[in-house]
Image (cartoon, helix red, strand yellow):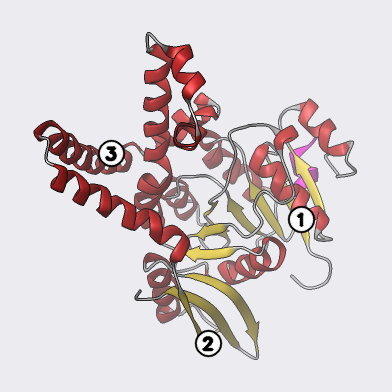
Amino acid sequence: MGGQRRAAVVGTGLIGGSVLLRLRDAGLDVAGWDPDPATRRFAAERGIAAPDALEEAVAGRDVVFLCGPLPTLPAMLTRVAGVTDDRCVLTDVGSIKADVATVATAQGLGHRFVPGHPMAGADRAGVAAASSDLLDGAAWVLCPGPTGLAAFRRLTALLIDVFHARVVPMSAPEHDTAAALASHVPHLLAGALAGAVQRAALRDAVLALAAGSFTDGTRVAGGPPVRTANMLLGNRDRVLAELGAVQRFLDELCDALTAGDAEALTARLDEARAARAALGSRSYTTQRREFPATAEHAGELAYIRELGAAGGHLIGCHVAAGAVSYTAQLPGLG
């Protein structure tokens, strides 16, 4: 992406609008498109090109971000691919990756479509809630395929440069499994807790007493229900499997509480506390790896996928003199 990079964002709600604003602020030549005329006007009023025609928005772009609702992504991918140059990198921001990756492969787009998922969001929706710093420093999953490493490298470099992203490379199925427990099941748990309060006889009294634990535990329940339902249904089998694991742990807590077994209850809570503590205390080691850039390389693909599965991420990607070099961070042993 030499010279001034040209990007387009299709679907400019909360995430897409935030992507669009950040690309604009970084000095890229950007255009946005949304099926809603009012949303297009919102972007245009902020000095961003927002043509009425999708084809005009994406033509001649180096990279296009697909940010519409999950059910629309396969058809939109087909449509955008048909009106963009073969060197244009395509990516999405959906929270489920396996289905859209399969569609891309079946359509022969694996060399330029890189499924993506920035791990950030808000309990609001729409372009009015978008912010240029919403995705700053986010963990951003990318799912490179065997024919798409050149596109993956270009996109990784862009995300690190513009969004300061921690790029987590994973296979699409591994992403969907990890996201089920990291993101999707928490939406169910938040909904269950908030829903139980909504039905409680002392609802208003409960809300009057609610403090940080309730607020933190139910934050994502404030999101748009249709968006959450699309996410859960799209990853249904994996969500149900991971929800089963949560239910089994909850059963252990309930059994200990029922039995009045303070030792067992404390042990389970201590186990949970260890995972929570690890969120803020993980240490990382930095490593650098280099691979030939002239051809698709099985060793390169295996390395970056294993990095993500091990909890690591990329903070640098550079192609020069026929080689690609990665700077990665891996979680320490502590």
Q: Nearer the viewer, residue 187 or 148?
A: 187
SS of the residue under disc 2 = strand
Q: Can I make out residue 6 in this image?
A: yes
Q: Is residue 54 magenta?
A: yes
Residue neighbourhood size for the residue with mark 2, other residues' Cα within 10 Å, grouped as few (<14), some (14–19), many (≥20)? some
Residue on which disc 3 sits:
243
Q: Nearer the viewer, residue 39 or 250?
A: 250
In the image, what residue type sits under mark 2? Pro
In the image, what residue type sits under mark 1? Leu
Q: CA distance from mark 2 to mark 3?
A: 42 Å
Q: Nearer the viewer, residue 189 or 118?
A: 189
Residue 177 x %, y %:
34, 50
SS of the residue under disc 3 = helix
What label sits on residue 292 in the rendered view? 2
Residue 72 x %, y %:
55, 35
Magenta part of the chain: 52-59
Q: Of the residues under marks 1 and 3, which one precedes in the sequence? A: 1
Indicate whether 199 appears above or below 327: above
SS of the residue under disc 1 = helix
Residue 214 x %, y %:
45, 31
Indicate whether 258 appears above or below 279: above
Camera-near label (2 vs 3) is 3
Residue on which disc 1 sits:
23
Residue at image point 34% right, 56% down: 275
Q: Of the residues under marks 2 and 1, which one precedes in the sequence? A: 1
Residue 145 x %, y %:
46, 64
* Residue 13, quarter of the rendered image: top right
Q: Is residue 102 left or right of residue 39?
A: left
Residue at image point 71% right, 35% down: 129
